[in-house]
């Protein structure tokens, strides 16, 4: 490995999940251009650089971009860091004069750096301000829990947290307002659901996940990011997406199933909107999960799923062709 790209596993802040599997799916060759849509602590980017690629890396979190500056400086022009959402990659690449790329990697969700810093407000394990904003801009989690009405809170908890007792939790939140700290919100949820410290899973987990996904519009970003990747990948380009829960994985699975040519046919009354479109992806791989050794080293890898495919030469599908997710608006 070159001096610009030390072993990504050596970064103590973040152990990249499914790194070997993602790199195998991307099959990076020297001189290629790859997009890392979720730079984080730069684990995937380092491996792409080490394989000889030019990398355009996105992160919506200004801290991740600032902390990546030393790596960009050391990469001598091979790494461009972009403080943007990955859903904007098609526009950004166009502005950079890049027509097509050879690979796109997305590692969805929060980083260990975000979770571990109490002041970012993502975690209920350490008390901090109720923030949860990846971009560090816009309304915070405190704004949401203190201003949304009970029905909206219940909808968010049910949809993005799959919380079976969403209405009860929403009622308790509204009754406890104002709530400004992560520990306060966690205590409200635990009281509402009857948590005992020796219970296996903290019931606050579902509420925190739901609010984070809603606030950061994470599922909408994933849908838009997949569509953007379809646009920027050249023929033969590789897509690798790592997701961490079933809501995300379902979106990736449906996207690749439809565009890989395996969409269910429409009925006689309602023809499939995508009927007749040639597949824009091929070689859609079976989902890959982390092996035991990785899960032992890095428990976060337990729920990770990698899906990968290769871009065909067909035109990208129209954005309206197949809604990959039904229902709620964010
Ligand atoms: C799981 S971490 C990525 C870790 C990275 N693969 C590594 O090896 O260090 C996810 C990162 O993606 C960023 N992120 C999440 N959604 C994003 C989006 N829609 N656009 C850009 N960055 C996003 C988060 O801010 C976070 O830093």
Image (cartoon, rainbow, N blue to C red):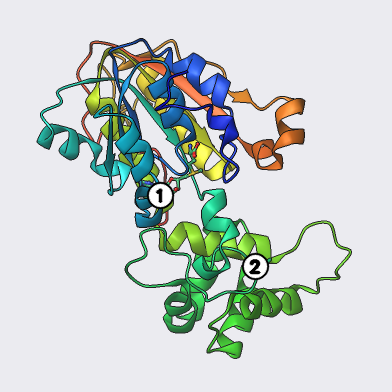
SS class, disc 2:
loop
Q: Is residue 303 among the parts visible in the rendering?
A: yes
Of pointers 1 and 2, the one earlier in the residue sequence: 1
Rendered view: 180 above or below 263 = below
Task: State which quadrant residue 195 falls in.
Answer: bottom right
Which label belongs to residue 124? 2
- Residue at the far front in the pictured view: 3
Q: Circle 1 sits on which residue?
A: 67
Q: Where is residue 261 in the image (x, y as percent from the top left)?
A: 38, 15
**Neighbour tally class for label 2: few under 14, some 14-19, many 20 plus, Cα within 10 Å:** many
At 43% from the left and 26% from the top, the residue drawn is 5
SS class, disc 1:
helix
Q: Position of residue 69 (x, y in %)?
A: 34, 44
How many angstroms separate mark 1 from mark 2 (CA)? Answer: 24 Å
At 42% from the left and 51% from the top, the residue drawn is 218
Front position in the image: 234 or 249: 234
């Amino acid at each position: 490995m070159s001096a610009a790209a030390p072993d990504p596993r050596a970064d103590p802040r973040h152990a990249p999940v499914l790194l070997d599997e993602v790199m195998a799916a991307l099959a990076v060759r020297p001189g290629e251009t790859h997009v890392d849509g979720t730079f984080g602590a730069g684990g995937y980017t380092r491996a792409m650089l080490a394989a000889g690629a030019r990398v355009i890396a996105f992160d919506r979190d200004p801290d991740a971009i600032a902390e990546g500056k030393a790596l960009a400086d050391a990469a001598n022009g091979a790494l461009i860091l972009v403080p943007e959402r990955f859903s904007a990659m098609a526009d950004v690449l166009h502005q950079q004069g890049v027509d097509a790329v050879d690979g796109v990697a997305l590692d969805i969700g929060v980083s260990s750096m975000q979770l571990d810093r109490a002041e970012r407000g993502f975690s209920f394990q350490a008390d901090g301000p109720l923030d949860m904003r990846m971009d560090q801009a816009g309304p915070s989690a405190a704004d949401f829990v203190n201003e949304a009405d009970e029905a909206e809170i219940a909808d968010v908890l049910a949809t993005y947290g799959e919380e079976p007792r969403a209405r009860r939790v929403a009622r308790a939140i509204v009754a406890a307002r104002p709530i400004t700290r992560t520990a306060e919100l966690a205590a409200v949820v635990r009281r509402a659901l009857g948590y005992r410290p020796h219970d296996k899973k903290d019931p606050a987990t579902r509420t925190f996940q739901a609010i984070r996904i809603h606030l950061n519009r994470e599922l909408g970003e994933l849908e838009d990011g997949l569509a953007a990747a379809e646009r920027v990948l050249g023929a033969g380009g590789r897509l690798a997406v790592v997701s961490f829960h079933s809501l995300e994985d379902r979106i990736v699975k449906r996207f690749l199933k439809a565009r890989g040519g395996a969409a269910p046919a429409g009925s006689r009354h309602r023809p499939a909107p995508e009927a007749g479109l040639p597949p824009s992806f091929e070689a859609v791989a079976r989902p890959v999960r982390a092996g035991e050794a990785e899960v032992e080293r890095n428990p976060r890898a337990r729920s990770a799923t990698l899906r990968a495919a290769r871009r065909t030469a067909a035109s990208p599908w129209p954005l309206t062709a197949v809604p990959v997710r039904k229902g709620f608006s964010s």
